[in-house]
Image (cartoon, rainbow, N blue to C red):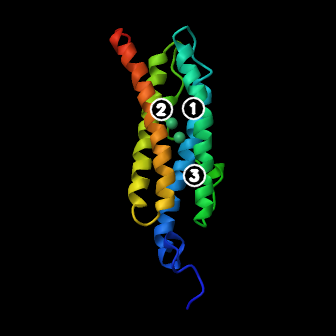
Amino acid sequence: MQIGRGDEGILSEEMAQKRDEIIGLLKQAYFAELETVINYVTNSTNPDGVRAQEIKEALEEDIQEELMHAQQFASRIKELYGVVPSSTDFKAEQTFLQPPEHQTDVVHVIRGVIDAETKAIELYTRIVQATEETDPVTQDMVIDILRDEQGHRRLFEGFLREYEAEGLA
Ligand SMILES: [Fe+2]
Ligand SMILES: [Fe+2]
């Protein structure tokens, strides 16, 4: 019998290519989480006004959760024998979370958050599909994270609904 990782599913030699594909997606997810941390710190600080308070507090709570997601993605990259990238490989993508012209423009922030969460949901759904039957451990982890993002988006959709109902969005 060959000594190696032949019967270990995603960790086996034959699965090297699939593993690379999954690691690539996990690196994207890792950076997406860290970019979200940056922008949620920004947007939990900048907004002015009574109406902004709730939004700022919700974002502040999410920061810790998104940071934990980044750490989970990093651990999983390592467990799959990948190398966690550094900031020199980072490319910013969350254009919708740029600060608005007026710091009382809370609707701009809400829409930006919904956009960021939607992109995370799309990417993590892709990872769930890519790991189907090949890497149940990664899949299980990403399903939990996906649920968090769905919850985040739902909360901000509720905020947006309130502004729409009042004719402010
Ligand atoms: Fe996240
Ligand atoms: Fe999120």
Q: Quadrant of residue 99?
A: top right
In this rendering, position of residue 169 left or right of residue 116: left
Q: Is any atom of residue 103 visible in this view?
A: no
**Percent x, y for residue 9?**
49, 72
Above-or-below relation of 54 to 62: above
- In whole angstroms, how far apart are the C-alphas of marks 2 and 1? 8 Å
Q: Name which of mark 2 and mark 1 comes first in the sequence.
A: 1
Q: Residue sitting at 46 percent across and 44 percent down?
A: 146
Q: Earlier in the sequence, mark 2 or mark 3?
A: 3
Q: Quadrant of residue 159?
A: top left
Front in this rendered view, residue 134 or 167: 134
For label 2, the SS is helix
Q: Residue at x 52, y 55 (%)?
A: 26
Question: Residue 16, relative to residue 136: is it above or below?
Answer: below
Is there a contact, CB below 8 Å, between mark 2 and mark 1?
yes
- Is the CB of mark 1 within 8 Å of ligand 2? yes
Above or below 43: residue 29: below
Please tell me the numbered disc located at residue 62.
Answer: 1
Residue position for label 2: 152
Where residue 17 appears, x then y in whole percent?
47, 71
Residue 15 in picture, x, y percent from top left: 48, 74
Quadrant of the drawing holding the N terminus:
bottom right
Give the amino acid type for the residue marked by disc 1 in the picture.
Asp
- Residue at 60 percent across and 33 percent down: it is 63
CA separation in Å, label 2 and label 3:
18 Å
Quarter of the rendering occupied by the C terminus: top left
Q: CA distance from mark 1 to mark 3?
A: 17 Å
Sequence-first tag of 1 and 3: 1
Residue that numbered label 3 is attached to: 73
Does the residue tagged 2 have its C-beta within 8 Å of any atom of ligand 2?
Answer: yes
Residue at the extreme bottom: 1
